[in-house]
Image (tube, rainbow, N blue to C red):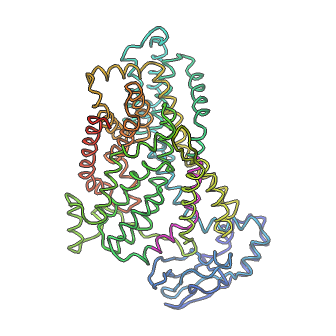
Amino acid sequence: MELINRDYIQDFFRLKSSEGELLDFIMSRLVLKEYSHNSFICRAGDSAEAMYFIESGTVSVLDENGDAINEMNPGRYFGEYAALTGDKRMADIQAKGTIQVYELDKKSLHAIVRNNEGIYGLFLKNAYGQATEKYRKLVRLLNTKRGIGSEGTGKKLTLPRLFFNYYIVFFIFLNVMLFAPNPAGGPLHPLWLCSPVVFMVAYMIITKRALEALVLSAMYTMILLARFNFIKAFYEYTLETIGGAADIILMVALMGSLTRIFSASGSINALRHIARRKIKSARGTLFAAFFSMILIAIDEYLSILINGACFMPLADEKRIPREKSAMVMGMSPGALCILSPISLTGIYLSGMILISGGQGELFLRTAPYNFSALFFIVFIFLLASGKLPLVGALKKAVIRVKEGGPLWPEGTDDDMNNDDDAANRGRVVNLLLPVLVLIFSSILTGSLGEGKFHVNVLYGMVITLIFAFLLYCFQRYLTPEQFFKNMVYGIEGMMAPIVMFLVGKCFAVGMEKIGFSSWLNEVVQLAIQGQVWLLPVIIFSVCTFVGALFDNPWAMYAIGMPIALNFSASLGQNQALYAGAVCAAGLVGNELAMGDIFFIGPMLGINPTAYYRTKLPYVIVLGALTFIAYTAAGYFGL
């Protein structure tokens, strides 16, 4: 039975059963051709006269140096992009053994598209199907990491878990409604004040779902405030939060659109091919990956995914142990993004600072006080340059590779070979130009108020989206329809941080309304006996513990940032130092938590537990240095 048959073609072009005449036309234009071993079907630079469907055999995709960069098997297709756009072929396609392909000439392909307008967009979706699937995989990882879907898509909760999640929670809520004292009648007992936090910690430890724990804890505080009318209170505080932070919510949504559109541009593949051609040394590979992450410090997981796909195969070619390259590519983005005001993390933290009573530019002022991020960047630079002392698992990995052993540790599922085809390579400038436009437009549209400069990231995003639309659609990498659909996909992927932001604010407001913030302030001041200089290091230590315990820094930010800024305001201390301590704790806590490795490990092609063992000694040292730095900063009144 033929593989490239009527059913295949009907599914490929998304034809309806009523479009039989068009299907007959396409089938009549398919020409079966056979190529012998090592013969070329396409050569780079040739005019594109047809596209091809592989019926049998295997073909190799060769780069400019004649090296095989991909293989395609029966059922795959190639050459469609150049045939549609009129561009030159971008790679050599060579037969590996005797192969058979069905050729569809360019004239017929254009006639199909011209007579059926809807096919063009559907056809290009096939070309970008891999990028879309990578993006969806990334969104699933992000949502799981940020507290949504940790149970896995489509999995049913077991009866014991279902019982705890809902029936016990309902029982707790009912008892709070019936027996908790009214806050209007006087200060609540410390046990009642602390009960929402205890509930949140217990629920998060058991369920591992940060967002759900935060939602239920916010409802818990609303029950303490309004009893049986808690839904109305929750609704009102949510609307208040939306109204006061609409620009932050819009920025997070648009950031999702931008990252999705960048992914669809195909420039990720171009970056990898350029790196393979230009970089000759192991040290150069790691430095290139590091500086690439500086440029695209928009979202840490997107940065890991892009740089893992681009530079990890090149690092393998240079015989760099996977443990070492994974540390460079896995630990850099978190430190870079937490310093960048145009990253998703930066936008989220700016919003948390703003709704916690801080000024709009306070996030920028935290950078010199975010000691862990600064230490991490220096650490990565030394590691990439080969000047860092090797200890533990990293030292063993270097010795293993030097003695001719495998590049990756035992238990690694080696799946780093990218299976993209040449037609989806794109251009690296399509990644660099929009990022530069985002940076410069955010600065140029900023404003000066009260003697301080405010970067206008929202304006920058809107300008960048317009620029990207013109850039990608003019080059026909995306149709207008695809561009706007990708925008929607991107916004959909940002629902987790948006909801986390809103619910975190509601929880913080609720805790303040019941008197928790004031009580905690009094308790801490009594405990430190006037030694205010201890507060920065205490905030860092506690928030690091909470972040590692929750395995979710975003949930910790929602709790820790309002408390830290409340301390700094009530004591007249440096707000940037206190906010910086919370930011630094999020980075260290996230690196100490084990959950993160199960997301980063697969993206970088390394056994997650081996990756954790390798980085742990260094993370502990960096955390200890940060602890000392905050102790010194508090003591010297920085």
Magenta span: 253-274
Report whether 494 appears left or right of 517: right
Q: Is residue 514 above or below residue 61?
A: above
Q: Is residue 446 above or below residue 20?
A: above
Quarter location, residue 394:
bottom left
Quadrant where the image shows the C terminus: top left
Q: In this view, does 452 lie above or below 318?
A: above
Q: In which quarter of the image is residue 431?
A: bottom right
Q: Position of residue 84 (x, y in %)?
A: 68, 75
Secondary structure of the magenta portion, mostly? helix
Whether residue 259 is visible to the viewer of this picture, yes or no, is: no
Q: From the top left corner, tell me how far across and down residue 245 is, in percent.
A: 58, 36
Q: Does any portion of residue 246 appear in the rendered image?
A: yes
Residue shown at the point (48%, 52%) measured from the top left: 299
Is residue 375 shown in magenta?
Answer: no
Give the residue furthest to the top: 185
Q: In which quarter of the image is the N terminus?
A: bottom right
Left or right: 8 as drawn, with respect to 133: right
Identified at 34% across, 43% down, the residue is 589
